[in-house]
Amino acid sequence: MKVKLLSALNDNNVDLAQTSSQRQLAITIFAIAGESDQNLPLNLCLILDRSGSMHGQPIKTVIQAVEGLIDRLKVGDRISVVAFSGSAEVIIPNQAIEDPESIKSQIKSKLTASGGTAIADGLELGITELMKGTKGAVSQAFLLTDGHGESSLRIWKWDIGRDDNKRCLKLAQKAAKLNLTINTFGFGNSWNQDLLEKIADVGGGTLAYIERPEQAVEQFSRLFGRIQSIGLTNAYLLLSLVPNVRLAELKPIAQVAPDTIELPVEAEADGSFAVRLGDLMQDLERVVLANIYLGQLPEGKQAIAHLQIRYDDPLVNEEGLLSPLVPVYADVVRAYQPDANPQVQQSILTLAKYRQTQLAEAKLQQGDRTGAATMLQTAAKTALQIGDKGAATVLQTSATRLQAGEQLSEADLKKTRIVSKTVLQE
């Protein structure tokens, strides 16, 4: 399995006379399988909410979705299942797939709904189970909940008890360091969208929204299909800039496909930068945008950066592999004419849609309904520019409701968040 690494600037020409020029560098990464390469075994942990609010049809549809995944697992794959309510329990310990019907029977009998929502307890047990089967496999968790984590009780300036949300984020960070990916599923309309988005973003995974119980099977299946195509794991983008070229100070790097995520940047000892990408898929491009500033450079074709991917290949049990070094060039010209790249422009607009929606949410939280509506309209127009009609409809609908003096429902808020990050799955 190899890495494919491509790059392009939004405008390849740079004005020689300008002392500073801003450019967006789009970097596309995916795995390429050789003729003899096989699909990697999966090490999958399902971390499922069985609190009282999941009683009835919700828990039945989740069981149905889980059974569908188990039927798609192959010989050599591994499965574990953790259920949580007021506490967490391992109901299927990490094991190789040998008797799928027995596993499904145990899940049916043990996944009954009652109690509270201790998400962090479930996440902690899930990470423990995943660690038992990581060798030579793609290790992923599906975390599903319909509620909020349990917060600590605050008396004056002291926190009494554990804050579930803080523990969740620390556990997601731990999972990323252990090369585990956490995907989150918000079920219904009462889950904490900020928490589940942060867990997924930190854990290198995807946030999915199950608005109605009958969508559970489709959403599980969609994401499962994505992780089946993973070819390489624990990938990092290594970015080295030449003198007189620098990263933007605020939000310098973001992923725009397959989902939009602000990516943290780590400075390396040699002055280069490392950005964790996580798992690389064979049929789904990961596209990253770097916001860079170029100082004055000599005239002509100039190398402004070098790119490389560091990754693990579980199929051959090798870690820390490096792709070939790829230079990034710009043409520094005396008679400047723009040389715009339409594909990079699409990525820029995708990121703009996400950030405009974030601004709208912030204004709404501050009580500025007019400002929120205006920003949602702007995001809707941006969505139309990139052909994302589903997002445009959701964003414009929310803007219109605010302008009419209506409150946005929990479903409105969650759809708005989802369409800002990705294409809404109907």
Image (spheres, helix red, strand yellow):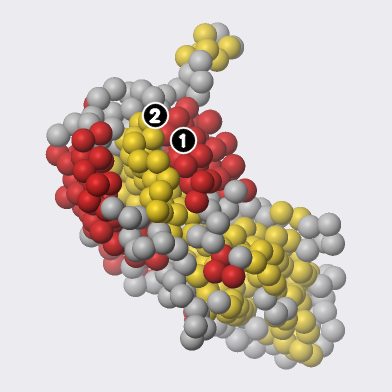
Query: Nearest the camera: 22 or 226?
Result: 226
Q: Amino acid at mark 2?
A: Ala
351 with respect to 73 (left or right): right
Q: Is residue 3 visible?
A: yes
Residue hosting label 2: 88
Q: Is residue 277 visible?
A: no
Label 1 close to label 2 by CB (< 8 Å): yes
> Which label was assigned to residue 125?
1
Q: Is residue 40 left or right of residue 298?
A: left
Crowding at dot 1, Cα within 10 Å, few <14 / some 14-19 / many 20+, comes out as some
SS for callout 1: helix
Q: Quadrant of residue 304?
A: bottom right
Q: Which mark is residue 281?
A: none
Q: Residue at x 83, y 57 (%)?
A: 269
Q: Earlier in the sequence, mark 1 or mark 2?
A: 2
Query: Which quadrant holds the C terminus?
Result: bottom left
| Residue drawn where x is 52% and y is 8% of the image | 155
Spatial distance from mark 1 to mark 2, Cα to Cα?
7 Å
In this rendering, the answer to whether 95 lies above or below 225 is: above
Task: Compare residues 344 and 305 and report the one nearer the observer.
Answer: 305
When asked about the image quadrant of residue 158, the answer is: top right
Q: Label 1 is placed on what type of residue? A: Leu
